Image (spheres, rainbow, N blue to C red):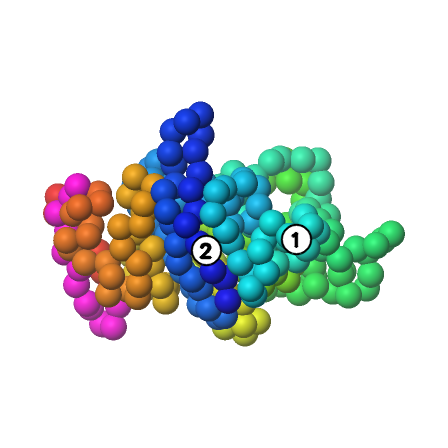
Amino acid sequence: MLEVENINYSYSNKDVLKEVSFSLGEGEILFIIGPNGSGKTTLLKCLNGILKPKGAVFVEKIDLRKLSQKEIAKKFGYVPQRGEISFLTVFDAILLGRRPYIGWEASRRDIEIVEETIRMLKIEHLAFRMLNELSGGELQLVLIARAFAQEPKYLLLDEPTNNLDIRNQIEVMRIIKNVVKEKRISAIITMHDINLALNYAEKVLVLKDGKIFAFGGRESINEEVLSAVYGIRAEIVKYDGKILFVPEL
């Protein structure tokens, strides 16, 4: 169980997050949606200790502030919106996800986990390419693979489908869903694509001006919420078992 209690965070005296509280159980996928500047990325960084907010984050009843960086890295796998380009091969970049577990050198198990992750994301053809040779979409897949290789309890994914074409967006979401269910971990995903959120989330948290505007199951997202948060008219319809967000043009 992940429990977030009264998180507040400010940049240069500007309040970015205000009294944010929620919980997430094992094997659940939570999508965080909201307009630009609503605090989505800041919230993810508070959850894994990159930022130090007021309030508390409890991981399996342990206060995050009592954990070392290595212990936090074993709990949380984080994929930022933009990854740093370095002169590493894809294989070595994914192997960095094993850093919390590696002693003097990588073990056979570490290598096997990297190989398994590469196969799972179907990027075998990239394994020995250099990161600086990759497209934005290819780099995004590598960052996701590195987080998977970390074997975390919680995946924190900041707009993971950025730079991906529609086929890879669907494939990545399918893989995330399968990994969450098979490994009994949890995922927290920021997303601008409301249709992906509606169709893959167990829970949805809507942020507006740094505050929780709505939180709950997919039914929490309705026309009134979207109108109030985004300032648009839209209809949510069901078609062939899918939920679709249709904005008024």
Residue 113 part of the magenta-drawn span: no
| Residue 109 falls in image quadrant | bottom right
Residue 30 is left or right of residue 146, and the answer is left
| Residue at 66% from the left image edge and 57% from the top image edge | 74
| Mark 2 residue type | Val
Quadrant where the C terminus is found in the figure:
top left
> Considering depth in this image, is 117 or 183 the residue closer to the camera?
183
206 in relation to 208, above or below:
below
Three-letter amino acid code at the position of disc 1: Leu
- In the rendered image, residue 215, in percent from the top left (x then y), is placed at 31, 58
Question: Residue 233 lies in magenta, yes or no?
Answer: yes
Camera-side residue: 34 or 140? 34
Disc 2 crowd, CA 10 A, few/some/many (<14, 14-19, 20+): some
- Per the image, label 1 sits on a secondary structure element best described as loop
User: Disc 2 marks which residue?
Assistant: 4
The range drawn in magenta is 231-242
Instruction: Indicate left or right for 119 with 31 as reference.
Output: right
Q: Is residue 142 left or right of residue 99?
A: left
Residue ID for mark 1: 67
Residue 248 picture location, percent across and down: 12, 47
Look at the numbered disc 2 and give the secondary structure of its residue: strand
